[in-house]
Amino acid sequence: MTFDAIAREATVVLCAGTGGVGKTTIAAALGVRAAAEGRRVAVITVDPARRLADAVGIPLSNRPQPIDGPWPGELSAMMLDAKATFDDLVVREAGSDEQARHILDNRLYQNLSGVLSGTQEFMANEKLFELHQSGEFDLIVVDTPPTRNALDFLEAPEKLVGFLDGKLMRLLFPRTIRRAVNAGLRLMLRQVSSVVGARIVEDGEAFLRAFQGMEDGFRQRAKQVTGLLSDSGTTVLLVTTPRRESIAETRWFAEQVLARGMRIGGLVVNRSHPSFSDRPVTELSELSAQHSEGPLGAAFAALVDAQTTVEAERTAVAELSALVAGAPVVEVPLLPHDVRDMEGVETIARHLR
Ligand SMILES: Nc1ncnc2c1ncn2[C@@H]1O[C@H](COP(=O)(O)OP(=O)(O)O)[C@@H](O)[C@H]1O
Ligand SMILES: [Mg+2]
């Protein structure tokens, strides 16, 4: 597969990599590439720094907003609002408007949803699934959340199932409270309230009652999301810089992705240094030594420095390329300035071939 093929054929692309390597930028650039192929594309960004929002110059909301540009397709972008996405999910899964309102108004839910949605992975997955289901887009590019562990995103749906199956639930609600709620033992509840506070118990009871019957829906949905992540149209795009630390983390991540049986669709080596010479560093060093006294001495020394960096980057990239064997690798040069606008995004997009 080539990047052209990804832009033309993939249905879901997950841009993954460690912080600051250019995930958000590459996600937007791939969106531009695919829109140039005439496709209807949505880019979901989870960029708290609002870089993409600023780059495309429109206020992003929790729904994809169209971005005008010289492409035959349609490009939309949105910034994930994790709390709003969670609320939407509750409303959809609830049996009635009343049940939804009971949950949304519940103080415990309000706290819990803050905590859960704080782990944006859940909601990025949820949003991805929702947009995929809507049928409005041919391709959805997800800029994965800036977590310490890039795997969190891929594992989120399973974790949600784990949550519903009780692990976290048990932590959140001590057994006494759950039993009291389940059995409806008012007396017991009153005793518990005297210890942990009446309000917490009331909230907990109301919360569990409000959620009754919804777990199955949640569980099923999490399984569908997991299915989408392993669908044949879904591909992971690894983004890295050619620097050692970044390469090491990317290697680890690539191994995990492959171990999960997922495809790595491509590798983007962003912020690569341009090469100024075809000659190896050893040869350049000799030339530099010969000219050290002359007017070209400083220039040769600078060239040796630059090419040393380039050679180190090449070696590192070659190692990674071997790991993602078969997947296309593109190098995107370090631009002389930040990617601040759509023009910058389009410049990057031209390298994704
Ligand atoms: N090829 C590049 N050349 C120059 N600046 C870049 C390049 N790619 C990304 N940047 C800049 O680097 C910063 C981090 O990029 P970003 O896409 O936000 O990374 P991430 O999403 O991985 O944290 C941004 O300021 C962006 O404009
Ligand atoms: Mg980002």
Image (cartoon, grey):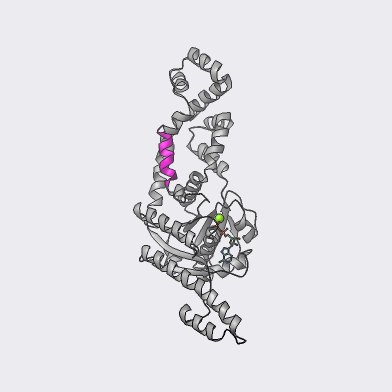
Query: Extreme front residue here?
Result: 293
Residues in magenta, as a range: 155-166
Residue 231 visible from this viewpoint: no
Give 160 or 167, whichever is nearer the viewer: 167
In the rendered image, the vertical position of residue 5 relative to residue 279, given as above or below: above
x then y, percent, for residue 52: 60, 58
Residue 106: % across, % down:
57, 29
- Say which of 247 and 352 sits in front: 247
For the question of whether residue 178 can be seen, the reply is yes
Residue 215: percent from the left, percent from the top?
43, 33
How many numbered discs, if any? 0
Provide residue 149's location: percent of width, then percent of height: 47, 49
Instruction: State whether residue 110 is above or below residue 65.
Output: above
* Res 74 → quadrant: bottom right
Task: Determine the main secondary structure of the stretch shown in magenta.
Answer: helix
Q: Which residue is at 49% across, 68% downward?
A: 37
Magenta segment: does it hold 291? no
When the figure is inspected, residue 145 is found, relative to residue 117, above or below; the finding is below
Picture quadrant of ligand 2: bottom right
Quadrant in the picture for the N terminus: bottom left
Name the residue nearer the viewer: 338 or 29: 338
Q: Is residue 36 above or below residue 210?
A: below
